[in-house]
Amino acid sequence: MSDAEQVLMCTFLVGGRQYGVEAQLVLEVLRAQEMTPVPLAPPVILGLINLRGQIVTAFDLRKRLGLEPRAGDQEPAIVVISLPDGPISLVVDEIGDVVEVETSRFEPPPDNLQATARSLLKGVFKLDSGLLLALDPERCVQFDSNLVNGSTHAHGQ
């Protein structure tokens, strides 16, 4: 396996599934933070976080994936990610580990995933413990008219 290319992934759970983003994109991981609501924002935007003087938009990954809301007693976690246009934060159910995965185990997203979730993925890594869904954070912050109008379900996909 010495000639197999490896990539580090920061993992987290959302809706019982294991997702990950490239570790070099992750700026930090936080417990739930106080958020300032944004009037008239799409429902996937939970609010703004003041991160040591920098304002960061918080996206609800459950809503973005078209999942049911988190249980009221479940404390979310936040993954702050660096994107070309500045940092964003993804609100997730639970933080996982940083894992090293082989790029040879990377495949396109499976067809049995809901279209909304599949559209937010770069692909999946087949691990011994199951699938690691490789999230594309840039796609998570892109909006279409369905999201702006309050629906998180993709139409016609």
Image (tube, rainbow, N blue to C red):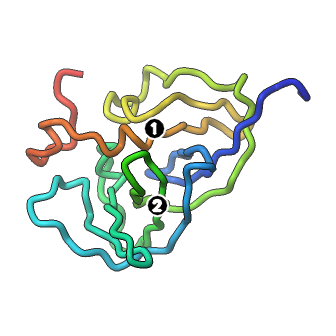
**Picture coordinates of residue 42, whole percent (x, y):** 17, 53
Residue at 46% x, 52% y is: 14
Residue 24's place in the image compared with 46, above or below, is: above
Local crowd size for mark 1, using a 10 Å CA cut-off: few (<14), some (14–19), many (≥20): some
Instruction: Identify the disc placed on residue 62.
Output: none
The residue type indicated by label 2 comes to Asp
Cα separation between marks 2 and 1: 18 Å
The residue type indicated by label 1 comes to Asp
Label 2 close to label 1 by CB (< 8 Å): no
Direction from residue 66 to residue 27 in the image, left or right: right
Quarter of the image where the C terminus is located: top left
Residue at 76% x, 34% y is: 6
Q: Residue 59 occupies which quadrant of the picture? A: bottom left
Q: Which residue is mark 2?
A: 93
**Picture coordinates of residue 104, whole percent (x, y):** 72, 22
Q: Residue 120 occupies which quadrant of the picture? A: top left
Instruction: Identify the disc placed on residue 136.
Output: 1
Judging depth in this view, the residue of 130 and 10 nearest the camera is 10
The mark nearer the N terminus, 2 or 1, is 2
Residue at 25% x, 58% y is: 45
Q: Nearer the viewer, mark 2 or mark 1?
A: 1
Judging depth in this view, the residue of 75 and 141 nearest the camera is 141
Quarter of the image where the N terminus is located: top right
Judging depth in this view, the residue of 137 and 128 nearest the camera is 137
**Picture coordinates of residue 88, whole percent (x, y):** 39, 57
